Amino acid sequence: MLKFRKKDEVAIVIPAYNESTQIATVVKGVQKSLKRAKFACTVIVVDDGSKDETAVAAKKAGAVVIRHILNTGAGGATATGLSYAEQNGFLMAATMDADGQHDPSDVVAGFKVLSEQNTDLLIGSRLIDSKGMSRVKVLGNRGLSFITYMLFGINSTDSQSGLRIFSRQALEQLRWKTSGYEFCSEMLWRAKQIGLTIDEYPIKAIYTDYSKAKGQNNWNAVNIIKSLLKRRVSELLG
């Protein structure tokens, strides 16, 4: 039987691949912000087959580290981290990127929003206010959000956001089949299929030369769309 934790103890899941230069800063930043907001937190870094010292740096910063021997992709690493949070009885969990793109204060805000309203999956949207994002990134993200709506009937201003907040019900029930970045859209689809409530809230996007270099480019959107189309058609015909 799972031992449920007190309401203010939350899990932060950070999928990471070759992020040794940045991961400690990200871990310590979110720990500091949550402590200041009176949340007890456990940071879970999923080292997705990194070839550098990501795992070592994350552990020294105070994170629980789960290591994948092979690189499984963002979807696979996220699933591993959220599974750990579910199995260890956390009532709420968040995912955030390892490259410093997300402001820890937005993670705190997300937990507060989820605590105050009846939502299972809360998406941190960079496009409610897209200040700081390049036009190319805005176009790419809006395009994928439109595809998500066309394929699955889900309205989201930022379907590819990596900052997401999960209720206990979402941790227990939400699963997906893709392991690459297409999981961001598939997660919304699966949440809708099982009747979870989905909402979004505004967050900031922090773009540095480092995070720009690490982020996915718009050409990858073509592969995401192809994968989503294939899965959608397969399930419709199956």
Image (spheres, grey):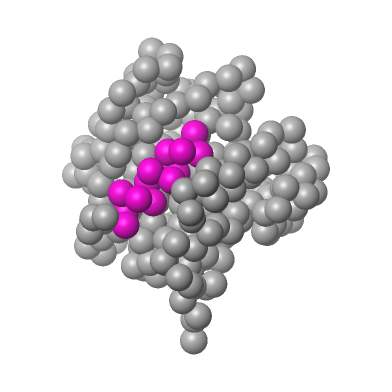
At x 49% / y 63%, what residue is drawn?
Answer: 9
User: Residue 204 sits in which quadrant?
Assistant: top left
Q: Is residue 114 magenta?
A: yes
By secondary structure, the bulk of the magenta-drawn segment is best described as helix
At x 46% / y 38%, what residue is drawn?
Answer: 105
Report whether residue 188 is seen.
no
Q: Please state, as top left, top right, bottom left or bottom right, where the C terminus lies in the image.
A: bottom left
At x 31% / y 49%, what residue is drawn?
Answer: 113
| Percent coordinates x, y for residue 86 in the rendering | 48, 68
| Percent coordinates x, y for residue 235 in the rendering | 30, 57
Left or right: 195 as drawn, with respect to 138: left
Q: Residue 97 versus residue 70: which sits nearer the camera?
A: 97
Q: Residue furthest top?
A: 135
Report whether residue 85 is seen.
yes
Q: Residue furthest bottom?
A: 1
Q: Is residue 150 magenta?
A: no
Q: Residue 105 versus residue 151: which sits nearer the camera?
A: 105
Q: How many marks?
A: 0
Magenta span covers which residues? Answer: 103-115
Left or right: 210 as drawn, with respect to 95: right
Q: Residue 175 versus residue 169: which sits nearer the camera?
A: 169
At x 53% / y 30%, what residue is drawn?
Answer: 101
Q: Height in image: 175 above or below 158?
A: below
